[in-house]
Amino acid sequence: MVDLYDLLYFGEKYANNDQTAYYFRKADTSVVPFEEVQPFLRQCGGNETVLEYEYGYIPLFQVNVVTVEKRYIADTKNRNYIAHFKDIPYERYDLEFKRYFDGNDCVLCDFEAVLKKELITCAREWCKSHGIPFSH
């Protein structure tokens, strides 16, 4: 059985690409980085279905944190926030988000709750879709 809270950190994605950063190893229910899985992925021609059934690795769910940050800013309907973040490029968005709200614990705590909820929802759906028993 997998504890969802053990997976949350690994489900956070900051890169602006489709590359899976972490995989779940079914044999021991551990999370491993892409680099460990890469040789097996090459052997099966990049086919993640074969990767799962031949080698026991499943791509871990991913929540794009910058996307959640952008949605959070839009949902505040705060003109100052929206104007400030309007033209910030993806590569700098997360850093600017944290810098801008540094010292404003209320906003960051609120955002952390939003992000955690999103991660838990994705983790639950991922477990269900792969038949992985979970708690929390």
Image: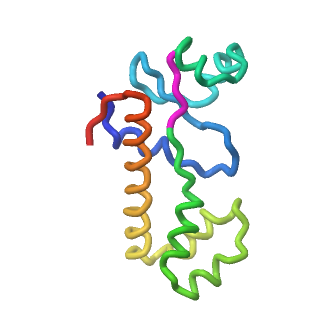
The range drawn in magenta is 56-60
Q: Position of residue 11 (x, y in %)?
A: 49, 44
Residue at 39% in and 55% down = 116
Q: Is residue 49 magenta?
A: no
Along the line of sight, the residue nearer the viewer: 106 or 127? 127
Tell me which corner region of the image, top left, top right, bottom left or bottom right, holds residue 96. Answer: bottom right
Position of residue 49 relative to residue 125, above or below, is: above
In the picture, the quarter occupied by the C terminus is top left
Q: Above or below — where is 6 with respect to 111? A: above
| Circle count | 0
Residue reaching furthest to the front: 129
Quarter of the image for the N terminus: give it.
top left
Residue, far bottom: 79
Residue drawn where x is 61% and y is 24% of the image:
48
Give the x, y percent position of residue 128: 38, 35
Coloration of the structure image: rainbow
136 left or right, relative to 65? left
- Placement of 83 over or under 111, stated as above or below: below
Asked whether 109 or 20 is in front, the reply is 20
Could you tell me which residue is drawn at 55 percent across and 34 percent down? 22
Q: Is residue 66 above or below residue 22?
A: below
Residue at horizontal 61 percent and vertical 30 percent from the top: 34
**What x and y, as percent, mark residue 61?**
50, 40
Q: Is residue 116 left or right of residue 133?
A: right
The majority secondary structure of the magenta stretch comes to strand
**Quarter holding residue 86:** bottom right
